[in-house]
Amino acid sequence: MIEEYADSLRRRYGTDPRDVLERLGVEVVEHPLEGRIKEIYFGDYVVLKSGIAPPYREYYLAHALGHHVIHKKGNCLYCHSVNHLTTLKKESEAEDFAACFLIGRKAAARALIKWGDCALEAAADNLHVAPEVLARRIQVLARVIF
């Protein structure tokens, strides 16, 4: 289901998570957030810590997009690190969505075939995503296959 949401949005609106959020009526604001918090999503707003370099910026925006399309009822969550794994179902779903949105199923399969013997970092670099995002995408694929 999450993968289908991601595929549908990519086909309909394109691959830029900021553009998709804005087209869905969500305002993205960059602000110098203090501490470890990188992104805050609430209602029709995403506050993104200013100065985050790609590909992490796209990850945090795709994460917020996942909350927006999957968790439509009363969601106010934050993400302070791409490595921050949580047991909260909503966070796990947003992580899966971000990985699926940034790396479609075909792109993930091609990456595994083409760069399967490379280090994860090299394959992620070729896909223009953070290594953690590619690792998460592989996990999602594995759940579907197995």
Image: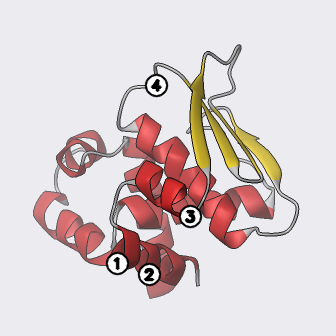
Numbered circle sitting on residue 11: 1
**Mark 1 or mark 3: which is in front?**
3
Height in image: 17 above or below 1? Answer: above
Numbered circle sitting on residue 8: 2
Please state, as top left, top right, bottom left or bottom right, where the N terminus lies in the image.
bottom right
Residue shown at the point (56%, 64%) measured from the top left: 24
In the picture, measured across the screen, residue 19 lies left or right of residue 74, that is left
Alpha-carbon neighbours of circle 2 within 10 Å: few (<14), some, or many (≥20)?
A: few
Numbered circle sitting on residue 24: 3
- Tell me the CA gap for discs 4 and 3: 23 Å
Camera-nearest residue between 82 and 16 = 16
Residue shown at the point (16%, 55%) measured from the top left: 117
Q: Are marks 3 and 2 in contact (CB under 8 Å)?
A: no
Residue matched to label 4: 52
Residue 113 visible in the current orientation:
yes
Height in image: 116 above or below 49? Answer: below
Q: Secondary structure at mark 2?
A: helix
